[in-house]
């Protein structure tokens, strides 16, 4: 052997070591024998509910679910990146409004037959099922329901001389009560009449749109291809919030609030009345006295944004049976009542709304009753139009509430353009 | 006529066994192989893939469809990107000038060995050890109107009467981001310039002083000309880094308020991961890459010529 040979060997070995991971990655095969672990992703906004379901399932089943929680703002990009790399988890939840887009991109597996075999298939939350169905095929089932409702702080109402047991029944009353608390208690800057996420597109749709629906109007056409956000029903709502901001009845940072902390002020006892996600009711300080009212239009009516997450099996999974075992269990009586209802969450099944836990708290009964009255808007291009910070909706809403209301009409045309892309 | 002696080299080589030559060639290739594999896998392959993506309609899952040159032609119809180009160029110009001035100032301050100078060098460099994303979050927290400590501090010492909207207006958002970038990078750039300053021979300074040159004359006629190669390096790093700005705007200002701080890379990110237009995002990336390479070539030529 020549003296160069060992070097050559080392070089060849290095090359081999460097290329080994690539070869291994290409040759990976799924393992379906025995108890399996399926991976699941969810977003931080509905983390508590997902964690409770996964923990309860893992305790009682041989198969296990490994849950990864991803910050809400980064969830869409993470799903997109994972899909592009064909590295989606076995199961992933999604904000229900993004489901049509994910379905159109082919990210979810067709589970029509599996859903059809469920004895309670007709009792699953209708808005979630509608958005999870495309061309008569089912792709997702409801995972968590998160409804927008008004929370009011009874202690602050009492201190301000308002009736602590009577929340607002119209948006105008909402504004009056917020203004009263601001005037009576807001002088030191620690208490504010109301709050909203003024630099957060998703917050606007979740909290402002129900007032439009409650007034009997719509924000888009049924196909989700034309925006109606320049119509009086919407601009009337903007005007009321604009007045609240101009009269300094909102927290001072409402205009800058980008979303991550918009629900953080109410539990601190700083806000009198504001729209909040129903999922936060169970997370409020136990000694805090909170009233819950449906979101109303300027002159009355009731509605809510039926948000939350749907969940489906990813199109790239190698373990669809194990994944479905978990999903179908989350919809069972046991999971819905003993996990979800026990923690004051809204149920994914309408036939269980009268369960023993929900009946204990009239606020939960009220929230459950709103599922039928609320709406979940449908649009294929929802995320890039309404949630994206660089999308046209946020600009429209900010002009309407803080800026030049005359720009609403041209920006509405941009929303329509974005919806049709 | 004297016969010319035969040069042994080429003939001897020509006569050498070809197997030995091949072995030497192979050995050379093997030495280069690890680097070549890394460069190939991590740079060349992704680059080729991005160019290929930019010529296709590329869905998240499923087969791609050739649609060239649509992804390129539609860039002109993307007002957000065109605004982002203007904003990024403005940001790059401001940050490069400020960073150069501040970093040079800091480097001159700590240039000479004096008692305590090590402390200041460390203190100036320390922010550079903080991850950029972490630094952006840190500023977000520090300058937050609800819980940040800066506002109460400024009010307590009487500089401001009410909370400052640090990221509430387009100008303030840009100002705050520039403050963040200066804080994070001035020390690092100071270090680069310090190595350049210390490579200038002390004798040159001594000769200038003996000749009666003032401090300003020494700075203009000795320090700046001899520092030019180091300044050039800093300039290229700063311009390239600023044109590719992402973290600070994505985390700190989120492109706001009202899309006033959207950088070019943010638009690429948005097109890819919010709009799922991977082909369009790839086309934007290719255009940016070509522009950056061209800019760097121009920059290097200009700096070389002026030397």
Image (tube, coloured by chain):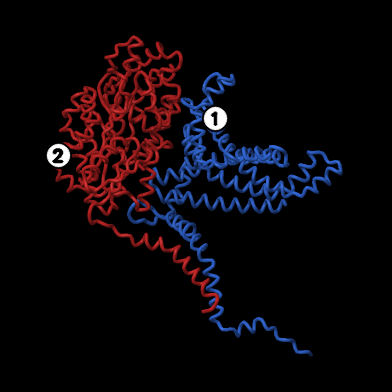
Q: Which residue is mark 2?
A: A120
Disc 1: which residue: B172
Q: What is the x, y in percent for residue B135?
A: 52, 38
Name the disc covering residue A346, or none. Answer: none
Secondary structure at numbered mark 1:
helix
Q: Position of residue B134 (x, y in %)?
A: 49, 39
Q: Nearer the viewer, residue A314 or A336?
A: A336
Residue B218 to residue A411: above or below = below
Query: Residue B225, percent across and down?
Result: 74, 47
> From the viewer's perspective, is A352 left or right of B196?
left
| Residues marked 2 and 1, same chain | no
| Depicted B150 relative to depicted A160: above or below | below
| Chain that bears disc 1 | B
SS at circle 2: loop
Mark 2 neighbour class, 10 Å CA radius: few under 14, some 14 to 19, many 20 or more: some
Chain B is shown in which shade? blue
Q: Residue, x 47% and y 32% (percent of image)?
A: B258
In-front residue for pair A300/A26: A26
Picture coordinates of residue B288, whole percent (x, y): 52, 49
């Amino acid at each position: 052997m020549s003296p160069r040979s060992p070097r050559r060997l080392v070089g060849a070995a290095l090359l081999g070591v460097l290329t080994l991971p690539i070869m291994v990655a290409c040759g990976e095969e799924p393992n379906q024998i025995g108890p399996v672990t399926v991976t699941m992703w969810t977003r931080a906004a509905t983390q508590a509910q997902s964690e409770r379901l996964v923990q309860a399932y893992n305790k009682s089943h041989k198969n296990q679910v490994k849950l990864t929680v991803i910050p809400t703002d980064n969830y869409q990009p993470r799903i997109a990146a994972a899909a592009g790399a064909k590295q989606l988890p076995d199961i992933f939840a999604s904000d229900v409004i993004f489901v049509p887009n994910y379905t159109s991109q082919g990210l979810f597996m067709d589970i029509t037959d599996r859903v059809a075999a469920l004895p309670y298939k007709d009792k699953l939350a209708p808005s979630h099922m509608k958005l999870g169905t495309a061309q008569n095929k089912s792709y997702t089932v409801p995972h968590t329901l998160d409804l927008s409702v008004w929370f009011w702080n009874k202690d602050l109402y009492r201190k301000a001389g308002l009736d602590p047991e009577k929340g607002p029944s119209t948006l105008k009353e909402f504004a009056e009560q917020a203004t009263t608390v601001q005037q009576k208690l807001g002088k030191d800057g620690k208490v504010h009449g109301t709050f909203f996420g003024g630099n957060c597109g998703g917050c606007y749709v979740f909290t402002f749109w129900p007032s439009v629906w409650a007034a009997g109007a719509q924000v888009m056409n049924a196909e989700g291809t034309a925006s109606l956000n320049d119509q009086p029903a919407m601009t009337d709502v903007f005007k009321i919030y604009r007045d609240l901001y101009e009269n300094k009845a909102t927290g001072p940072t409402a205009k800058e609030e980008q979303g991550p902390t918009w629900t953080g002020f109410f539990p601190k006892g700083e806000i009198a009345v504001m729209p909040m996600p129903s999922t936060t009711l169970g997370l409020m300080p136990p000694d805090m006295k909170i009233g819950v009212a449906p979101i109303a239009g300027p002159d009355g009516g009731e509605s809510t944004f039926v948000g939350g997450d749907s969940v489906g099996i990813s199109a790239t999974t190698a373990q669809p049976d194990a994944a479905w075992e978990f999903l179908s269990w989350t919809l069972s009586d046991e999971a819905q009542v003993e996990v979800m209802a026990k923690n004051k969450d809204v149920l994914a099944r309408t036939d269980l709304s009268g369960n023993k836990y929900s009946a204990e708290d009239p606020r939960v009964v009220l929230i459950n009753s709103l599922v039928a009255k609320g709406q979940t808007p449908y649009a294929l291009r929802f995320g890039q139009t309404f949630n994206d910070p660089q999308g046209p909706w946020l600009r429209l809403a900010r002009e309407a509430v803080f800026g030049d209301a005359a720009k609403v009409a041209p920006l509405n045309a941009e929303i329509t353009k974005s919806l049709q892309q | 006529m004297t016969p010319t002696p035969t040069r042994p080299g080429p003939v001897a080589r020509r006569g050498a066994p070809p197997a030995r030559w091949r072995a030497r060639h192979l050995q050379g290739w093997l030495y280069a192989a690890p680097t070549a594999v890394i460069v190939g896998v991590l740079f060349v392959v992704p680059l080729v893939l991005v160019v290929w993506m930019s010529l296709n309609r590329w869905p998240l899952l499923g087969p791609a469809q050739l649609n060239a040159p649509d992804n390129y032609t539609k860039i002109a119809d993307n007002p957000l990107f065109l605004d982002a180009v203007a904003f990024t160029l403005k940001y790059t110009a401001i940050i490069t000038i400020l960073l150069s001035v501040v970093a040079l100032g800091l480097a001159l301050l700590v240039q000479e060995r004096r008692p305590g100078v090590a402390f200041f060098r460390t203190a100036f460099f320390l922010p550079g050890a903080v991850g950029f994303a972490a630094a952006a979050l840190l500023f977000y927290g520090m300058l937050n109107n609800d819980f940040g400590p800066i506002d109460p501090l400024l009010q307590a010492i009487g500089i401001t009467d009410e909370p400052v909207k640090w990221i509430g207006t387009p100008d303030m958002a840009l100002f705050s981001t520039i403050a963040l970038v200066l804080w994070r990078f001035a020390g690092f750039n100071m270090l680069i310039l310090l190595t350049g300053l210390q490579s200038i021979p002390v004798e040159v300074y001594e000769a200038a002083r003996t000749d009666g040159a003032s401090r300003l004359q020494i700075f203009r006629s000795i320090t700046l000309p001899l520092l030019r190669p180091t300044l050039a390096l800093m300039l290229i790093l700063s311009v390239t880094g600023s044109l590719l700005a992402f973290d600070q705007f994505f985390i700190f200002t989120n492109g706001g308020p009202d899309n006033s701080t959207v950088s070019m890379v943010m638009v690429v990110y948005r097109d890819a991961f919010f709009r799922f237009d991977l082909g369009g995002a790839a086309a934007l990336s290719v255009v940016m890459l070509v522009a950056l390479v061209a800019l760097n070539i121009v920059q290097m030529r200009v700096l070389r010529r002026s030397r």
